[in-house]
Every structure is written in C-alpha cells, then in structure tokens.
Amino acid sequence: MARIAVIGAGMGAMAAAARLAVAGHRVTVYERAQTYGGSLGQYAEEGFAFDTGPGLLHLPAVYRDLFVKTGKEPLERCVQLTQVDPASRHLFADGTSVSLPNASRAGTVAALDTALGGGAGATWGAFLDRARDAWDRSRRPLLEEPLRPDWQVLGRDPYPAEERRRLLRPARRAGTVAEIGAWELADPRLAALLDGYALAYGLDPSHAPAGAALLPYMEETFGTWYVSGGMRALARAVYERCLARKVEFVFGAEVARVVEKDGRAAGVELADGTVAEAAHVVLGARPWPGLVPGQELWADGDVTVRADGAGAGRFVVMLSLRGGRPADAVHRTVVHPADGAAEREAVFGGRIAAHPTVTVLRPDDPSTRPDAEHEAVTLVATVAPHGPVDWTDEGLRARFAETLTEAAGTAVPGLRERVLRTRVRTPAETAADTGAEGGAVPPPALGGAGGAFLHPANRTRLPGLLLAGGWSHPGGGLAHAGMSGALVAGTVVEGDGFRGSQ
C-alpha cells in the first residue's frame, strides 16, 4: 500500500483516485477550489439550475466501467441516465432544419435525405463509413492505451479521405475537417454540421486533422445521454464513490510544487508551506512553470504541453424563463451561422465572432426549474479565450449574450419575451475557478497533423509523477478525462508492463 497525492479534483483526477484506492493505495486529493468536479460546475438561483460545463454525456461506457471497477453499485444506481432523442436539431442559415435521432445510423440518413434532399443522407452515410475506419484505427492507441513511445506513428491521419482529382494538377485528399466538408460533403449544410462537431470540442475546422471525423462517429454511434439533475450529478456520484473508497479530499489546498527526492516524485508542497509525502503524485491539471523545480518533465522528442498559450473557451448564457417547457421542445438545438469561415477566423484569431454557432440546451428536468410554469435554458458558444478578448468587460459580455440570445430565438419562439433573468459565464470565470490558462477547454487527442493534436503522455520523465485529465493523453472531453484516470491507475498498479484496457 502506497501513499498517493492527487492534485486537483476534476473528473480525470477523481477517476484515477477511485481506481487507485480500490487497488489498496491511500489516496489524498488536494484541490485549490472549495469543491470537486473541475469543469462540471452548476449555477443555481431561485429554483433554477444550469450546468456551467458540459451539458451532455457521450460514451457513458467509460463511467460505467469506472463504477463497475470501483464497487458493486453500478453507475445507473447512482445517477439517472436518459438517452436524448432526437440527439440534436440543426437550424441552418437558409432556413432548413433537421432533427437527428439518437444512435440510429439509418434514421440519421433518412432524416438528412428528407430535410436536405439531393442525396444528403447517402453522402453523410458514406462519410460515416470512412469515419468508422478512423475510429477503428484510432480507438486503442488514442483512447485505451498509454501514449506509445513511438508516438510519431500517430502523426499519420487515420481518416481514409477520398481522392480528389483536379484538372492538370496532382490529386489531393482532404487533410482537415474543413476540407472534408468542402470536398467530400459538398453541401454547405453538411459541412456546417461537421464543423459544429469540431467547434463543440474547441477545434478549428480549418486546422483540425481529418481524423477528427471520429468525433461525430463516436456521438452518432454510441449516443447522447443526459444525467438527471445535470452533469454536476455525475461529478457528485464520482466524488461519493471516491469517499466510499476512503479517498481523502482537502479543499482550499493549492499545490505550489511537486517535491522531488532522489530523482523521483516524493510528495507535494502546498502554498502555505505544508509538505505531504507520497510515493506517487498524480497531476490532474495543466502543468505550470516551476511545478518541479530544476526538473524537465519531457525529453526532446516527447509530446509536450504546447507553448502557444490557451486554446478556445466557452461562453455560456443561462436564461431563467417564464412559461413552461413545451412538450415537443428539443433538448439540444444547434443554430448554424451563414458564414462559418468568418466565425472560425474570429474565434481562433482571438476575436469575437459576429455570428457564432449557438447550442441551445433545454433539458426536460424538473430539478432545473422552480416549477412547471418556468424553464431553464442554456446557450453555449465556442469563443476565444480570456486574454486576447477581455471577458471581464461588462459591456462586451452583455452584448455577446444578446447576440447568442437573438440567434437562439430561431430555436425557442418568443424567447426574448420570456426572459426573467440572464446570467453569463465566460472564459474569465473558467480561468478563475479551474486555473486553466485563459479559461481554455482542452480538445481531445487526434491522430494526424504530424502529432500536433496529441497530448503529453500520462507518465512523465520524473518517476512517480503522472498526469491525468484533459491536458494529458487522451485529451479533453468528459469521456476522455475518465479514460485518462484509468490509464494513470493502470500505470501505477501494473508498472512498466501496463498496456491499456483490454
């Protein structure tokens, strides 16, 4: 039995803590905030409740596995999971719309054919066939195994792009999400649909490798789920599982550095000077300068934390509405702008998009509203991080919230007249609450682009120090964070012989 210190109480860190505790280790979690869950926060006011982080769950099998491996009580006894059907409705700038069923390939193809015509369903279905190949090639090395030492082989894009022949010029294949949309999907509405999946993960479709096609495949194949009580209920269930396995939590405890002794991690030093010894340290946050004084966590040739600063963040508008939720309301609607390229250039150029993609979430959940005569609606847009944009500017926040509310009016008729109260959460709040630089949300690891979209391995060059959560392999996203916890625990328990889940 070893003493293990975990830095941070995000989902990846807690997943690692629970698994390590079950393996017989004494685990203590040190969290700078006063609560658990990392990005899975919740804002509540006068009977209304809103998720401030992810609002839906994909790949619930990751958390089912966590609960099976850490106790007799399965996930569904701890939280109520409901499949969202339709999984999403999409409103396009030309006035057309389509509702996509949950985890039904045939249903999706039929819905696209009916709504968009012109063989749109068959085109999207053929794309999903290629995306399935990318998933099959990527699943184990990108999600279920530790990052391999010869990670450079993952720099080859797993997506089997169609060859595009050009008059008097060499044939080319789509190398990015945007090129798949332009060259293989052709219909700008299908291209917008694909772009929306990338944007939702904080990825720039113009630069994200074609291998990102596995993201819509993952969602459309394994389904979209809602956790009753909001995603915060999932964080609470994981936290309670940790407590049941005797994991100790110390909140309001900011870790200043990792203690090194005899060439390996030997504990953590808190900001108040307190030192807690440990045989292993798990970092569930993005590494910062001075984390291990005098030590390099990565050698030349390793995947390292990018030095180019923060990526994209999330702007969230929480609307308390008068009037009940209609019975035919759709849980998730995505409102696509007319000019997706202009949005991408703004967001990933450090500016505010005039017409952003807006996701409207309307959960049919009594716990999110004071009574049946009211409704809680959340609007979400991917935005530039805090820094390039000053998200503390009250006027700017109010104007952008109005932009999202206006766009959402096409999804929620009479929305503006129903608003009782508007609350806003920006990357500035995310940065303050989680410590993430600029309030950025880490994207998932992807194959292709020479490995530029991979994340640092869970094992660092300092023996005894491991990384969990979205800033390490296999990257960001709720399911990915849970996978990182499994990889870290397996590495500690099985040592050098660990090769991933079977």
Image (spheres, rainbow, N blue to C red):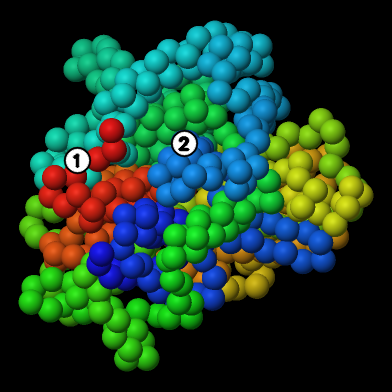
Left or right? Give the position of 158 relative to 437: left
Q: Position of residue 402 (x, y in %)?
A: 72, 57
Q: Badge 2: few (under 14), some or many (20 or more) residues near its Cα, within 10 Å? A: few
Tell me which residue sits at (54%, 76%) in the image: 34
Q: Which residue is tagged 2?
A: 61
Q: Which mark is residue 499?
A: 1
Q: Nearer the viewer, residue 344 or 146?
A: 146
> Counting residues from the N terminus, which is met first, the one under dot 1 or under dot 2?
2
Residue 455 pos. (x, y %): 27, 51
Who's the residue at 60% across and 14% down the image? Answer: 107
- Above or below, 181 against 469 in this view is above
Instruction: Please state if 86 lies on the left or on the right of 308 as rendered.
Output: right
Q: Is residue 493 visible?
A: yes
Counting other residues with Cα less than 10 Å from the Cα at mark 1, is it few (<14), some (14-19), or many (20 or more)?
some
Secondary structure type for disc 2: helix
Using residue 436 as the reference point, say whether residue 80 is left or right of it.
right
Residue 51: % across, % down: 64, 55
Q: How many marks?
A: 2
Q: Secondary structure at mark 1?
A: loop
Quadrant in the picture for the N terminus: bottom left
Taking the image as shown, residue 339 lies to the left or right of residue 306, namely: right
